[in-house]
Image (spheres, rainbow, N blue to C red):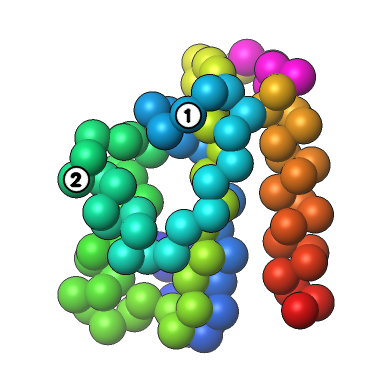
């Protein structure tokens, strides 16, 4: 949340679990993420993106434009390499972010 404070446009890339098969790419806005969180989809972090969005909204620090790309993880164990599906998705998201940045 601190990383996006002061920026009008932010792209956040994160891992997620429970919204599709490994390597699936999801693109959300802040409202979508908060709705998904209520449906039990979880971030791989102890404090999820939805909680950070809610807190930023309450504090008035939510960026004007926030786009979230979530890549469905196969294994979130520390030290594990990316699966081929997730590795492919990472490259896909890089291309999408670059396209958005130049659009």
Q: Quadrant of the N terminus?
A: bottom left
- Asked if residue 4 can be seen in this view, the reply is no
Residue drawn at (35%, 59%) of the image = 32
Where is residue 44 shown, x and y percent of the image? 41, 32
Left or right? Give the position of 26 relative to 88. left
| Image height of 78 relative to 6, above or below | above
10 Å crowding of disc 2: few (<14), some (14-19), many (20+): few
* Residue 32 belongs to the span the image colors magenta: no
Residue 39 higher or lower than 77, as above or below? below
Closer to the eye: label 1 or 2? 1
| In the foreground, 67 or 7 | 67
SS of the residue under disc 2 = helix
Residue occupying the point 53% across, 23% down: 21
Label 1 sits on residue: 20
The quadrant where residue 54 appears: bottom left
In the foreground, 54 or 32 = 32
Q: Which residue is mark 2?
A: 38
Please provide the residue range marked out in magenta: 80-84
**Left or right of 40, for residue 43:** right
């Amino acid at each position: 949340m601190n990383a996006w404070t002061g920026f009008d446009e932010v792209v956040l890339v994160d891992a997620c679990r429970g919204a599709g098969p490994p390597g699936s790419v999801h693109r959300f806005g802040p409202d979508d993420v908060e709705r998904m969180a209520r449906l039990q989809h979880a971030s791989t972090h102890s404090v999820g993106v939805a909680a950070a969005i809610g807190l930023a909204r309450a504090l008035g620090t939510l960026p004007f434009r926030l786009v979230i790309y979530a890549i469905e993880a196969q294994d979130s164990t520390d030290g594990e390499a990316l699966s081929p599906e997730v590795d492919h998705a990472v490259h896909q998201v890089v291309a999408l972010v670059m396209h958005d940045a130049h659009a």
